[in-house]
């Protein structure tokens, strides 16, 4: 039998949404072992005055196995 736990985290990137998600997962993996997946709950962008995207932000739920 296995048990999973879910945590929520926020991550950001100036490059892309994919990079924001990857950055968040890599940072979480430094203290959480056994990550099995993530759900992106919400996406936000920060823009400059001309409407250009300057930063991508992702709110995620990350699941991992309880040891």
Image: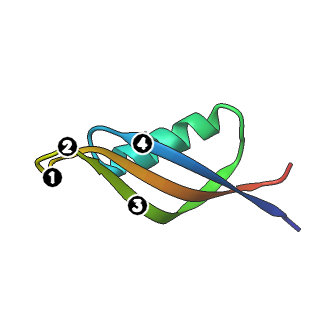
Q: Which residue is mark 2?
A: 48
Which of the two residues, 26 or 8, is positioned nearer the viewer here? Answer: 8
Report, in whole angstroms, how far the alpha carbon at label 4 lies from the one at label 2. Answer: 16 Å
Precedes in sequence: disc 3 or disc 4? 4
Q: CA distance from mark 1 to mark 3?
A: 16 Å
Q: Position of residue 67 (x, y in %)?
A: 86, 48
**Quick check: 14 left or right of 51?**
right
Residue drawn at x 57%, y 35% as measured from the top left: 27
Q: Residues within 10 Å of mark 3 (few under 14, many from 20)?
A: some
Which of pointers 4 and 2 lies earlier in the amino acid sequence? 4
User: In what element is the residue under mark 2?
Assistant: loop
Label 1 – label 2 distance at C-alpha: 5 Å
Label ID, residue 43: 3
> In terms of sequence position, does the residue under pointer 4 or pointer 1 come before the other?
4
Question: How many labels were placed on the picture?
Answer: 4
Circle 1: element type: loop
Q: Measuring from the top left, give residue 48's x and y in whole percent.
A: 19, 43
In this rendering, would 53 be left or right of 58? left
């Amino acid at each position: 039998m296995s048990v999973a736990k879910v945590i929520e985290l926020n991550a950001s990137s100036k490059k892309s949404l994919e990079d924001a998600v990857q950055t968040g997962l890599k940072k979480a993996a430094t203290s959480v072992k056994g990550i099995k997946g993530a759900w992106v709950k919400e996406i936000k962008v920060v823009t400059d005055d001309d409407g250009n995207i300057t930063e991508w932000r992702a709110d995620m739920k990350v699941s991992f196995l309880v040891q």
